Amino acid sequence: MKKELLALVAVCATAPALAAETTIKPFHAEYATLRNGSEMGHTTLDLIDNHDGTWTLRSQTKGTSGAAKLVGIDITETSRLRWKDGRPEAIVYDYKQNGGFKQRTRHADFDWKAGVVHIVEGDGSFQYATAPGLIDRQTVTLAIANDLLRGATSFDYKIAVKDRIEEAHYTRNTTISLSVPAGTFDAVPMQNTGATGSDRKRVAHSWFAPSLGWLPVQIEQVQKSDTITLKLMSSKR
């Protein structure tokens, strides 16, 4: 199970008073998680206001069907972030995967005063310079949702991965009607066809519903022969 295929979600935001009217609000959402069209698990997404100028985005995916249930897949991602100039910036990121006959961890600290990202993954340690607006991979969906809310016309992001910064560009497509377990929604499709600086080809699609405050109603990521899809089951704010 590729961790990149399961590290899919996050939508949320915090803001200083200046941006308070144009950021995604806290929420709890639940998604059915499918692999190649077959349901394999359940994902919960939570956005929490820490009331100290930072917010926490947390996603948890648990295997509930088939092989994912058999091997006890349990993946948790936690991002702590802040707003700067109306866009998110990463502060701390943690990834933990249990099950699947192995454990994976990644921890990232974004030291903005020193201008350095420190990442520990397994037994390896990496360090490189920050860049304005740098976010972790989980926070990409948040950044897209917030840019849609702000009425942005370009969707370019700098993403901190293990040992470097990747640059991703998303394209907004024509609004469609999309049915998911939570209902049928007018949804704006966003597509990314890979990231510069990456040696692994990923194709990502997300569909955001204006009527739900730009919450993603469906997220899909394709890598090699695997397609992982999240479909919204329920949400509340």
Image (cartoon, grey):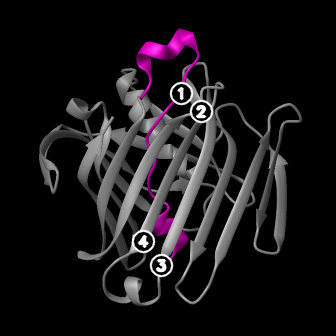
For residue 183, side relative to residue 172 (left or right): left
Residue 75, percent from left and from top: 52, 68
* Marks 2 and 4, how far apart at CA: 25 Å
Residue on which the image places disc 2: 50
For residue 150, side relative to residue 49 (left or right): left
The amino acid pointed to by label 1 is: Thr
Residue on which the image places disc 3: 73
The amino acid pointed to by label 3 is: Ile
In the rendered structure, does residue 8 fall within the stretch colored magenta? yes
Identify the magenta region: 1-24
User: Residue 1 bears which disc, if any?
Assistant: none
Q: State the SS at label 2.
A: loop
Q: Earlier in the sequence, mark 1 or mark 4?
A: 1
* Marks 1 and 3, how far apart at CA: 30 Å
Observer-nearest of 237 and 224: 237
Q: Earlier in the sequence, mark 1 or mark 3?
A: 1
The answer to whether residue 175 is above or below residue 200 is above
Residue on which the image places disc 1: 14
Q: Earlier in the sequence, mark 3 or mark 2?
A: 2
For residue 177, side relative to residue 23 (left or right): left
The answer to whether residue 68 is above or below residue 41 is below
